Image (spheres, grey):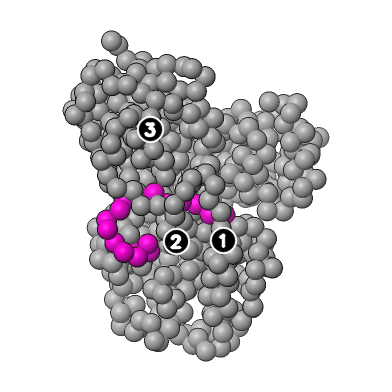
Amino acid sequence: MDADYDLLIIGGGINGTGIARDAAGRGLKVILVEMDDLASATSSRSTKLIHGGLRYLEYYEFLLVRKALNEREILLRAAPHIIHPMKFILPHEKHLRPKWLIRLGLFLYDHMGMRKTLGGSKQIKLKKDSPLLDRFTDAFTYYDCWVDDARLVVLNALDAKDHGAEILTRTKFISAQNNGDCWQAEISGKRKIAAKVIINAAGPWVSDIINDGLSLPAHNRLRLVKGSHIIIPKLYDGQDSYILQNKDNRIIFAIPYEQDFTLIGTTDVPFTGDPATVTISKQEIDYLCHHINAYFKETLSADDVVSHYAGVRPLYDDATQEASAVTRDFVLALREDAGAPLLSVFGGKITTFRHLAEEALKRLEEFFPQMAEHWTEHAALPGGDIRDMKEYIRTKQEDYPWLDKKLCARYAHHYGTRMDEMLKGRGPDAKLIGPGLYDYEARFLITREWAITADDILWRRTKLGLTWSDENVAQLEEWLMHHI
């Protein structure tokens, strides 16, 4: 029987959309199904960093760090509108790690991967106006990158679609039978399709797909770890981020977020249960507040938290006892004992998604000899063909003088060169739906980026939800009822 598709990809997170993009660009016929919205689970609940993982050096994950540092440069070049360099300050805690050890770690971090854009690390003296407690006098600085994680997923899906992939959100994978030549699969809406290969990139649900959807024994162990973050009003001035060492060997980040806020996280807590119902606990909020208060002059309490989120990381279980020490590297498990291949993705981190996609397709080369060569290393993501972000924003503010300058800058960072498509034919008479959201942007997100609900728009396509009232949200929901 002839297959409808070369690949059926299950999961619309960063790994699923990254593989779909790469595969479609190589000429494969791809369909991706996601039971909810793109990036609706783990991929929108990260610490929002493209980084090598400085702390992974302590666990001797040298190959992972090198791989991630190389990807950091590639992704910064591919999507400068949603990824930008960020300086981190690491205050020195004498009783936790000696200076020589930190200097050694940062030296390795500077030189393990290709570093063409970002600055190197330094040892510094903290000034009196530092937001940190006066007992901190010495610190180290280094650079990594910030990313809008949910938008990174959407841009991969968009590029996959532009290369011919079929992207179906709110579409659940039901089951599949292997007939030897291909998979006969059923997805929601009682639609039946045939695919030569299934790629299981369902994140926390990867074992459920194998056990329940495919009626196979799970061939790798999955370890679920909850990571939670809190968002508070701006804790300090400036654009620097802080990486804080704790006695439990964990680290916590404090990161400037959406101009007026600070993002703090993350925790590492073993998780059992349904990943769809994951929430932050009171203990996690108290944990994050406690460790912030051990470093900063400004005192933080649970009452200061304006928003929070929790995600479940689907890590490969390497039998490590501590959740924070479990490898963040990925494992690709290829199964072809029943005929048509099944490739399952275990673990991984957002920084290495593009490399993961290349490795996944490398594992499938024998099944698709006509597949083209890898191509994503030097390709911009949609909207990312920008050399100088500051100059681009200045140019767009001249092109659209009727736009508020801050709003124009937000569009440039969210959509890059695609903002011209969104603003074509628009003018100052546009209808304002809620704070910072005009009707043309909402329509663009619906027609071009798979947005359907208020949450899709306010939390995954934008972060406007941070400043919206319940009344504002109700207005958007009313608007959506008449426009979808």
| Residue depicted at x 49% and y 67% | 253
Of tags 1 and 3, the one toward the viewer is 3
Spatial distance from mark 2 to mark 1, Cα to Cα?
Answer: 10 Å
The residue under label 1 is which amino acid type? Ser
Say which quarter of the image contains residue 425.
Answer: top right
Decide: is 286 above or below 296: above
Q: Are marks 2 and 1 in contact (CB under 8 Å)?
A: yes
| Residue depicted at x 61% and y 27% | 447
Q: Name the residue tied to disc 1.
A: 281
Mark 2 or mark 3: whose residue is earlier in sequence: 3
Q: Is residue 312 magenta?
A: yes
Q: Horizontal and vertical percent for residue 261?
A: 64, 62
Q: Horizontal and vertical percent for residue 364?
A: 23, 31
Spatial distance from mark 2 to mark 3, Cα to Cα?
Answer: 26 Å
Image disc number at residue 164: none
Decide: is 190 above or below 314: above
Q: Name the residue tied to disc 2.
A: 269
Image quarter where the C terminus lies is: top right
Image disc number at residue 212: 3
